[in-house]
């Protein structure tokens, strides 16, 4: 069967290899203001990317998103109609959980903490999807697995 | 919908993994069908019937809720 918008299984590992270092770098940048000097552009304000001379956070967040997308859209070893239905259930769950978290945060988290929360919230849909999907695969494993 | 996959599997002396491999689906799918958590597509139901060489109605049966 032809499953649209899916990638070969090996992209699970490629995605993980992209996601992990970028997520660590992003967390270090967000909380300890770590910046990689070689990601700085020479030049003055007013050039392209005005006001932004270092691209550590851009690289970290883009890498985290790309890594999570690769993992989310990689097929399982034996992708079939039941696995696809688990996938769909997991996406439903992730979107709902994402907005429930956001609604809670809107009323309980304020000021700069809210901005920090929103940075993480950009990644919660694929993260919750992956956790839920892996859990469902595990829960439905056969007796001799 | 109820099904008799587990019974047929026992008659043919197949494990869940062997059945999954023969019809080209995941082991999770066999497990979910046997525990009535998943209703297979028509294509998959026909493949299972063909493998066991019996009519599809002898494996899959409607229950009161259907």
Image (cartoon, coloured by chain):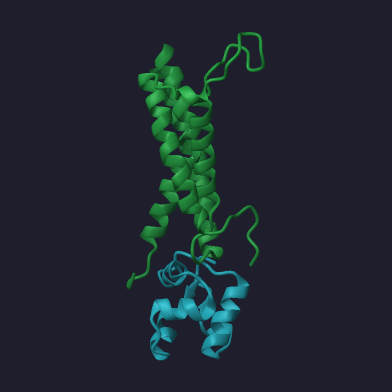
- Horizontal placement of A93 versus A27: left or right? right
Point out residue A32 in the picture as x, y percentages from the top left corner.
35, 20
Q: Quadrant of the C terminus of chain A?
A: bottom left
**Residue farthest toward the top in the current orientation of the protein:** A45
Residue at the spot x=40%, y=90% of the render? B11
Q: Quadrant of the N terminus of chain A?
A: bottom right
- Looking at the image, can residue B4 be seen? no
Identify the image quadrant of residue B36: bottom left
Residue at the spot x=52%, y=45% of the render? A92
Looking at the rendered structure, the number of numbered marks drawn on it comes to: 0
- Looking at the image, can residue A25 be seen? yes
> In the figure, the green chain has which letter?
A
The answer to which of A44 and A129 lies nearer the viewer is A44
Point out residue A12 in the picture as x, y percentages from the top left corner.
48, 53
Point out residue B17 in the picture as x, y percentages from the top left corner.
41, 76
Point out residue A49 in the picture as x, y percentages from the top left corner.
63, 17
Residue at the spot x=39%, y=22% of the render? A34
Position above or below: A18 against A24: below
The answer to which of A120 and A51 lies nearer the viewer is A51
> In the figure, the cyan chain has which letter?
B
Position above or below: A85 against A145: above
The answer to which of A64 and A116 lies nearer the viewer is A64
């Amino acid at each position: 069967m032809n499953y649209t918008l899916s990638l070969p299984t090996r992209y699970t590992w490629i995605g993980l290899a992209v996601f992990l270092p970028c997520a660590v770098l992003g967390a270090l940048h967000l909380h300890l203001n770590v910046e990689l000097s070689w990601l700085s552009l020479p030049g003055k304000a007013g050039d392209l990317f005005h006001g932004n001379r270092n691209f550590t956070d851009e690289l970290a967040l883009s890498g985290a998103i790309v890594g999570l997308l690769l993992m989310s859209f990689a097929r399982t070893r034996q992708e079939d109609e039941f696995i696809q239905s688990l996938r769909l259930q997991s996406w439903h769950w992730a979107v709902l959980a994402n907005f429930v978290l956001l609604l809670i945060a809107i009323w309980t988290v304020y000021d700069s903490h809210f901005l920090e929360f929103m940075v993480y919230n950009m990644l919660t849909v694929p993260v919750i999807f992956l956790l839920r999907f892996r859990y469902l695969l595990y829960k439905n494993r056969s007796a001799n697995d | 919908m109820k099904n008799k996959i587990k019974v047929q599997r026992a008659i043919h002396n197949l494990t869940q993994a062997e059945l999954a491999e023969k019809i080209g689906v995941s082991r999770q799918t066999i497990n979910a069908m046997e525990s009535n958590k998943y209703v297979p597509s028509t294509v998959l139901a026909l493949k299972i019937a063909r493998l066991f060489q019996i009519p599809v109605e002898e494996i899959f049966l409607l229950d009161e809720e259907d």
